[in-house]
Amino acid sequence: MAAKPPSIRQLAMPIYAPTFLFSVGQGAVIPIVALAAKDLGASVAVAGSIVALRGIGTLLFDIPAGAVVGRLGERKAMTLATTLLVVSLIGCIVSTSVPVFALCMFLMGCGWSVWLLARLAYVTDVMPPTLRGRALSTLGGIMRIGNFVGPFLGALLVTVHGVDATYAIHIVLVIAGWAVLVSVPEPDGPGLDAAEVAAHGPIRFRAIARDHRHVFLTAGIGAMSLSVLRASRQAVLPLWASAIGLDAAAVGIIFGISAAMDMTLFYPAGSASDRFGRKFVAVPCLTVLGAAFLLLPLTHSFLTIAAVGVLMGFGNGMGAGIVMTLGADFSPAIGRAEFLGVWRTVSDIGTAGGPLVAAAIAGVATLGAASVAVGALGIAGAAVVALRMPEPLRRDPQVASTQP
């Protein structure tokens, strides 16, 4: 007899609590990466590229992360990820050169890949489609809450103890999250039966890309566009703030204000996604974020940048968990982990490519031009999702029958 799916509340300690601790640490570190690279002697273009290296590390490790989770098991794999993250953060503290700092950012992305893929695969397996949007938007929302707390904590630490203190607090919180993870049992879900487990084979990137090419050319483009917007926000916003004379503490406060808007919308966004469809939240998310990037070059003070940051937070919050939810919806029962590895790769191309594109445009033109280009890409992604992507909920009779 199949196990009963867990409630969202049952995911609180084994899934959401470690994610929160991890995200607080990430939130403290992310706003200062570009500025720390500049302090080591990097140009604006190189600093943007270093921000991108965290995404590149995630991208290149997505498919291997699926193999690591499958071979070692979720908890051993996440122990490995925690170790890698701690090593990379210690490297950030002791590095005195741009290349070493860049390598640490790359390793940080590799660790994040294992962490996130393990969480996504577990929630996808145990939660039914009728709760999947809320479960994954809550996971995304927990990250946003952490990203709200983190920048304020980071701004305080930078002011009192310097930049290295943000890396130190991230180390403490990563280890605390790992301790919660390994000490709290995870609830069981329906899972796959023996025949389905036996049907799983090795990861075949080309076969998955070929068999699901329509998904990747529609939903995948939307996910990639959203990833470009989210990753570019981490590079373009602080660099623009620095260009008009704001310091690291002010940038941290702006990120925190933006994250405050993020975290207020995650559960309503998940509920709307489950009730009205994934397009209902994906299209406005891409449109509003894109518009915010178009407006950023018009800002010239703390207040105006903060207002654009709030708009970015609003757009991003509308799409809380949507990339994970789309991947879960379109993933097949057989070969789910393999599909999700490829899905994460596609979306993380945007995470890695966004800051690189912005840095390249800033290098040959201006930072304002880079912001406008990223915003235009977001609007184009919204059009693809609205006009070409099939609505996943319509494909599932169990979900369709619950819609009003």
Image (tube, rainbow, N blue to C red):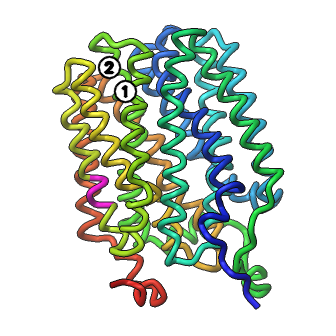
> Where residue 166 sits: x, y (%)?
60, 21
Is 283 a magenta residue? yes
Q: Position of residue 251 (x, y in %)?
A: 39, 21
Q: Which residue is disc 1 drawn over?
A: 254
Query: Which label number is shown at residue 241?
Result: 2
Q: Residue at x 30, y 14 (%)?
A: 243
Q: Is residue 238 left or right of residue 78?
A: left
Q: Kindly indicate the quadrant of the structure image that contains residue 3.
A: bottom right
Instruction: Please say whether residue 359 is visible from this viewpoint.
Output: no
Within-10-Å neighbours for mark 2: few <14, some 14–19, many 20+:
many
* Residue at 25% from the left image edge and 34% from the top image edge: 308
Q: Is residue 180 above or below residue 157?
A: below
- Please indicate whether residue 225 sits to the left or right of residue 398 in the image: left
Q: Position of residue 39 (x, y in %)?
A: 50, 9
| Residue type highlighted by circle 2 | Ala
Labels 2 and 1: the sequence-earlier one:
2
Q: Which three-letter amino acid code belongs to the residue tagged 1?
A: Ile
Give whichever of 187, 72 is nearer the camera.
187
In the rendered image, the vertical position of residue 249 relative to residue 170, given as above or below: above
| Between 122 and 229, the one nearer to me in the picture | 122
Assign the C terminus to one quadrant of the image: bottom left
Q: Please provide the residue range marked out in magenta.
A: 282-286
CB atoms at circles 2 and 1 under 8 Å apart?
A: yes
Q: Nearer the viewer, mark 2 or mark 1?
A: 1
- At which x and y percent is residue 45? 39, 21
